Image: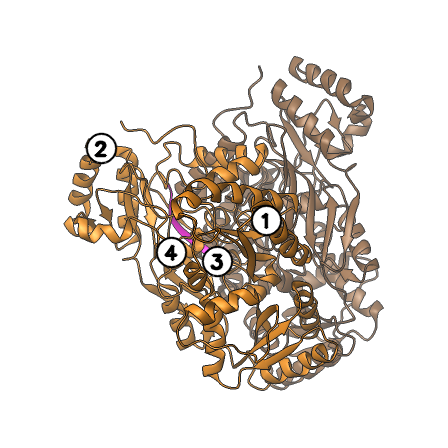
Chain colours: A orange, B brown
Amino acid sequence: MNPAQSRLLHAVRAALGDKVVIDDPAAIEPWLHDWRGRYHGRTAAILAPDSTAAVATIVRLAAEHRVPLVPQGGNTSMVGGATPPADGSALILSLRRLNHIRQVDPAANLAIVEAGVILADLHDAALAAGRRFPLTLGARGSATLGGLASTNAGGTQVLRFGTMRSLVAGVEAVLPDGQIHDGLTALKKDNRGYDLDHLLVGAEGTLGVITALAVRLVPAIAARAVAWVGLASPHAALALLRQLEAATQAVESFELLPAESLAAVLRHIPATRAPLAGLHPWHVLIEAVTTDPAAEPPAQVLERLLAPALAADLAADAVIAASEAQAEAFWRIRDSLSESERALGPAAQHDISVPVARMPDFMLDAAAACDARFPGTHASGFGHLGDGNVHFHVRAPAGMDPAHWYGDLAPVVTAFVHDLVTAAGGSISAEHGIGQMKLAELQRLAGPARMAALRAIKSGLDPHNLLNPGKLVALARAPATP
Amino acid sequence: MNPAQSRLLHAVRAALGDKVVIDDPAAIEPWLHDWRGRYHGRTAAILAPDSTAAVATIVRLAAEHRVPLVPQGGNTSMVGGATPPADGSALILSLRRLNHIRQVDPAANLAIVEAGVILADLHDAALAAGRRFPLTLGARGSATLGGLASTNAGGTQVLRFGTMRSLVAGVEAVLPDGQIHDGLTALKKDNRGYDLDHLLVGAEGTLGVITALAVRLVPAIAARAVAWVGLASPHAALALLRQLEAATQAVESFELLPAESLAAVLRHIPATRAPLAGLHPWHVLIEAVTTDPAAEPPAQVLERLLAPALAADLAADAVIAASEAQAEAFWRIRDSLSESERALGPAAQHDISVPVARMPDFMLDAAAACDARFPGTHASGFGHLGDGNVHFHVRAPAGMDPAHWYGDLAPVVTAFVHDLVTAAGGSISAEHGIGQMKLAELQRLAGPARMAALRAIKSGLDPHNLLNPGKLVALARAPATP
């Protein structure tokens, strides 16, 4: 612990009591690395306030003592965004004790939640009020709303209601100088200068610490249907999606995966089975919902719309889950993709997007280009076709030493993939953010105008580089120790 | 013209030719004041480039010579946002020659338009492609897309598709140092750092000059119906809106006006007549549309849904336009409100929002409070009830000298109204922006956290305060002359 940190902890204890400082190494340890085990940090203490006012006090004192803070929610970042620096220069600011749902207002279709509320808990609270919070993802049992907003998270239900950005109606945050920005009053129109809420969403805790959110709710689901479709190509999948979209607004998920991803799940995840009897090169999971109990049941909608696709050979085979348990089983396959891929060995993983219409070509062309360029590796993608966003993974050659792969080869592979994405007008981070993992690649590929603007915004709002330093954008200036 | 301006004009002529510099006073004069005649500026020249590259050259040279620029589109600002400073320190940068519609892509539901494209021209181009650009407002014949995005404009069709912010899928802009930010590739997911596009939308040209936009299109209208409803109160109007929204997604406009606003139109606008025979204290214009020719016709939807409202006395009387000509006549009344109010004499006008559910109370209570506090004045509001946004006008006492009103009394009235809005958790600028008109009031009411953040962003991105200085946020530092 450096002297500035000691002084800060002393001041924090004096202002907020001992309970807010966690310095037992055993209690700190689980929060020092990301869940994938890629990034390992060090810190002298976790600060765990339980109110917005206490967060403001901590941030103000940290600014005074020039001690960097790493905001942390559920610690489910895919890019090392919540892992403290390895040199121990920063303290962790945990938002997990800010876990109250302040209000659920079904008439206004809004909820006010604190940053540490876990996604699954908001799902439950909305449901109890006859509403729904539509964003969901595999980590819903541990990801927090503050982290989801700070990373503009996506997930498997973006098709209809968008990413977190579309669902955030207002932000409460502590700015780097310790002042509280209160944007929670959800106004449908508000043109009082630059949109701070939109700036904080996706800023990965580098411009302010989100302490609470006003989020939009949508009508509760009256009925859902989940279908599994086997088909020949990503092109067929996109054509099928376009047909469905033209005929109905009921489709909320459209997740594409290749045969090999399904095979990996069946091999490595217990109690899973193939939804279809035959073998197909590509598969799609489709979820359709209705919010109106009197409307045509979604199973019937899917049956009606899939029949002509089967007749026209756009789809090779399809099955609609006959029960909620079977629907859950289909979803379990989708939600287990990341876990089962890990069982296949080391891989370079890329969360990328291109314009939707270009995605089928991109998936095939990029995989072929990777396989040819890096003999022994194997590339494939799966994910959110309708969002133009897939997770594009390149597996290491069989038997390769993981240290050699991650240290030497994977960065070359990643640069190659990112160059392909950039050439296709795409993004090297569709939904996971930049964190520390993609910092250098962003700098390499974003272009000087964007990088200059990111740096100008960061240094304008956080001139001492104290909030989540070394994530999203690197400033020339290191955090200063007074 | 100061020496820095001379040097800049010389450099611009050398780089881009003489045609880009307009210095004939007669050609400049129409662009020196706002259309309401409230703000009067001076400038030595208008720079009128016709390409993004030329805009970049001008902004780069202006930065080099430290000459402030005032970006200008159709010059229809309601808050003096496009009027140059009175001291002649800035040049006007006109975007009107960047007026190409680069692309209309009906399959992707996107168009790429340059900043100087006039709104009505985009409406026509979308229609020709079987699509629709849903935002519209009274100034559609002169307002440009760049200005609409820079001010996050709203208008009369926000209910369903939102303000410009919701319709902008990507931004191309020249940043204050002359670099080009190209965000036109419309990705559905992109988490590469701070959202520059959202930052530029609504920034009123103070952070960058928008040169082109990717905008969303929606399906073309197959049929529309326009109804006029007489009712007892804003509360009845909001209850009626909630009933309609629960039953249909067809309602795209819901505009509220008091009897006196209708009377002013009938008195001052030629060839207008009252839609209903009787007298009612409040009126609503409702537009319902369908995009599916096979769906229930919107006139029938409105008839079916208004009947129970009439039976329950929620509405006192209603008529559905029997022809497109009658529908246009109803809309003409709504679109003439501002013009007819001007005929009633000087007024203090406020473009304000509060949470939708609070608006009916606010309209009545705030009007009563104003009338009581400022004897002889008269307050009333009209506008976009469903957005929680009304235009709240306080008329000067009859016969008062306009100079006395605008100079002495109106600012006091405005501060009083803005205090009421702030107490109700609302915004002093719902859709018109800050410009120069609301600069001091924003500073008075925004709170120190927001003001510090606005200043930090502005000075981070435009450290020499060269883009639209004196609008939206005042920096302590005046534009520097080298």
> Does label 2 or label 1 sit earlier along the sequence?
2
Discs 2 and 4 carry the same chain letter: yes
Report whether B296 appears left or right of B39.
right
Q: Is residue B395 visible?
A: no
State whether discs 1 and 3 lie on one chain.
Answer: yes
Question: Badge 3 local density, few (<14 within 10 Å), some, or many (20+)?
Answer: many
The numbered mark at residue A76 is 4
Q: Residue at x 53, y 50 (%)?
A: A376
At mark 1, the secondary structure is helix
Q: The numbered mark 1 sits on a residue in which chain? A: A
The secondary structure that most of the magenta stretch takes on is: strand
Position of A336 relative to B459 (above/below): below
Please determine if labels 2 and 3 lie on a single subunit. yes
Residue beneath disc 1: A370
**Residue underneath mark 3:** A168
Which residues fall within the magenta stretch?
A168-175
Judge depth for marks 2 and 3 and give the one in front: 2
